[in-house]
Amino acid sequence: MSRASHVSLASHALRPPPVAPHPETASDSAGEAVGSGSEVAVDRARRRGRGAESNASGRYEAEARVAFDDGWHSLEDLPPFKTTVAVDTARKVITRNDSPDIGFDRSINPYRGCEHGCIYCFARPTHAFLGLSPGLDFESRLFAKPDAPELLEKELAAPGYEPRMIAIGTNTDPYQPIEREHKIMRGILEVLERVGHPVGIVTKSALVVRDIDILARMAKRQLVKVALSVTTLDPKLARTMEPRAATPPKRLEALRLLAEAGIPTTVMVAPVIPALNDSEIERILDAAAHAGVKEASYVLLRLPLEVRDLFREWLMANYPDRYRHVFTLIRDMRGGRDYDSQWGTRMKGTGPMAWMIGRRFEIACDRLGLNKRRTKLTTSHFVRPRRVNEQLDLF
Ligand code: SF4
C-alpha cells in the first residue's frame, strides 16, 4: 500500500473557520472560543522561513482541503512550500479606488502575493480571489505581470488620461525578492520617468536602492517619493513577523542611501501592534531621522477577513504570553472588535490607547523635526505617450 499523502475535501458549511492553534481549547479575553486549528496547521519543517502557520482554503472555495495523517506518516511526505511564480495575464495594470481615507486614487501592483510573508499583511485576503489560501499560498504562490510596463504605457496614452500620483507597493511589495530576476518595477519606473508621471513607492525591501539612478533623476523633477516601512528594530521579532523582508538595519540603510541621493523619504511605522512593537515607536523614528528621513507616518494593525485568524495563530505560536494582552488592547482600539473597517478610523483606531499612540507619534515627530514639510509631487512634466496608431501615422 502506498504511503501517499492524503488530502480530504470537506464542505465549508460543515467546517468551522480556522482558528488559532492552542494546546488546548480555551477562551480568549473576549470569551471567544479558541480551538486547535490543527486541521489547517502546517508542519514547521514545511514552512521554514515563512510567516503563516497554516494554509486554510480561501473563503470563496466551496470545499476546504484538510491534510490528515492516516497512520502511515503520510504528512511527512509532503514537500516544503517552494516559491513559484506564474504569469498574470491581466490586460490593465492601473487599479482605481475611491477610498476617502487614503491619499491616492490609483495604484499598480506588479506582483500578486508577496514572498516577504508579513503575518499581518492586509493584502493576504486578495489571494482568495485566485482560489488560493491567504496563508502560506499568499507567500509562496506568486504571480508576476511581466507586461506591466507596456500595459502602463498604453493606459497612460489613452486620450483623456489625467495624471495623478500612482501609488506602488500599497498592496503587495514591488521590490519583493522575485523582482531581482523579473525587473518589472524597474521597467515601470522607466516608463514613468520617460513620460514625467509622479509616483509614490512603499516597500520593505532594500532592493529599492538598485533603482536609485532613476529615482534620483525623478526626484529632481518632483516626480517621486519613497516610503520604507520599519516595524521593529528587534531582529527576532522582525524575523518571525516579516520573515523574508529586509532586516531593520538594511531598511534604515536603504532610507539613508535614498535620502543621501536627494529622494524624499518617509518612514512608515506600520503596523503598530499594541504590546508587541508600540514601545518602539520613538526608537524607530529616532533611527529613521538619523538616517536623513524627513517624513513619517504610522498605521495601526488591521485584521480584515482571514488576516485575523492568521495573526492569532502566529501570535499564539510565537508570543503566547502576550496573546491576551495584545487582543485586549486591539479590541480597546477597535470598538470592542478585532477589526473595524470604518472609513476614517480603520487606519488609526479609536479610544484612549489609540489616542495615546497618536500623541506619542506626534511628539516624537515634533522633537525630531519630522513632517515639517510634506513632499508635493507634480504632474506638470507629464507628456502623454503616443499610442501605437499615432506612431504608425508618422510613417
Ligand atoms: S511586504 Fe507588504 S505586501 Fe509584502 S507581505 Fe509584507 S505587508 Fe504584505
Image (cartoon, grey):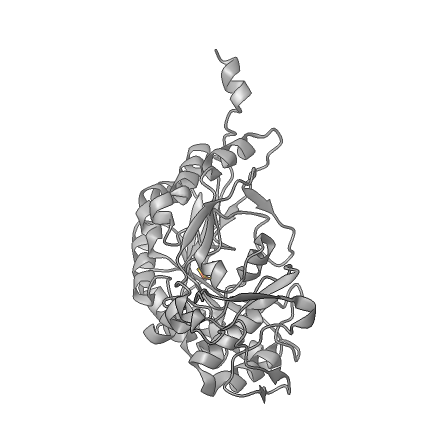
Q: How many marks?
A: 0
Instruction: Pick the quarter of the image with the N terminus.
Output: bottom left
Up/down of 67 relative to 228, above or below: below
What is the x, y in percent for residue 304?
60, 67
Q: Is residue 231 left or right of residue 93?
A: left
Q: Is residue 354 left or right of residue 212?
A: right
Residue 294 sits in which quadrant? bottom left
Foreground residue among 272 and 377: 272
Q: Which residue sits at x=36%, y=66%?
A: 49
Up/down of 55 relative to 338, above or below: above
In the picture as drawn, the residue positioned furthest to the top comes out as 395
What is the x, y in percent for residue 253?
29, 60
Q: Which residue sits at x=59%, y=34%?
A: 161
What is the x, y in percent for residue 152?
51, 36
Residue 289 sits in which quadrant? bottom left
What is the x, y in percent for residue 136?
47, 63
Foreground residue among 375 and 158: 158
